[in-house]
C-alpha cells in the first residue's frame, strides 16, 4: 500500500511502559495532522511489538525510548525494518 492510501500508516512503539504518556502525545499529534496512528501499549516484548506492526502492514513504526522522550523525538523504522533514525515530531 502507498502511505497516503494505507489504512495502517503509523504504529507508535514504546520500549518501556514508562514512555506510554509520551507515546499517546505523539499519536495525538499525528492524528491531529491527519495521519492514521496507533500505539501498542500491550505487555508484549519490544521485539514482538515491532514484529506485530510489521505483520499488520504498518508503513512506519515510531520507536520511543528514554532518549527520544528527553529529546522530543521518535526513532523511525520502516515496514521492512530499515532504521531511518531519530526525527523531531
Image (cartoon, grey):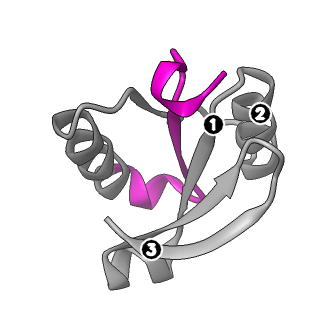
The tag earlier along the polypeptide, 2 or 1, is 2
Mark 1 to mark 3 CA distance (whole Å): 16 Å
Q: Position of residue 77 (x, y in %)?
A: 67, 56
Disc sitting over residue 40 in the figure: none
Could you tell me which residue is drawn at 73 percent across and 66 percent down? 83
The tag earlier along the polypeptide, 3 or 2, is 2
Locate the C terminus and report the quarter of the image it occupies.
bottom left
Which residue matches tag 1?
59
Q: Is residue 62 magenta?
A: no
Locate the N terminus and report the quarter of the image it occupies.
top right
Circle 1 SS class:
loop
Left or right of 56 in this view: 85: left
Disc sitting over residue 54 in the figure: 2
Which residue matches tag 3?
87
Left or right of 52 in this view: 16: left
Magenta region, residue range: 1-20
Circle 2 SS class:
helix
Question: Is there a contact, CB below 8 Å, between mark 3 and mark 2?
Answer: no
Circle 3 SS class:
strand
Most extreme residue toward the top is: 7
Amino acid at each position: 500500500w502507498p502511505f497516503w492510501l494505507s489504512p495502517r500508516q503509523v504504529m507508535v512503539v514504546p520500549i518501556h511502559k514508562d514512555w506510554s504518556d509520551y507515546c499517546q502525545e505523539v499519536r495525538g499529534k499525528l492524528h491531529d495532522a491527519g495521519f492514521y496512528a496507533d500505539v501498542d501499549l500491550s505487555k508484549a516484548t519490544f521485539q514482538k511489538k515491532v514484529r506485530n506492526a510489521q505483520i499488520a502492514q504498518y508503513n512506519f513504526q515510531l520507536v520511543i525510548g528514554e532518549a527520544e522522550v528527553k529529546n522530543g523525538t521518535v526513532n523511525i523504522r520502516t515496514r521492512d525494518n530499515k532504521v531511518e533514525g531519530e526525527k523531531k515530531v
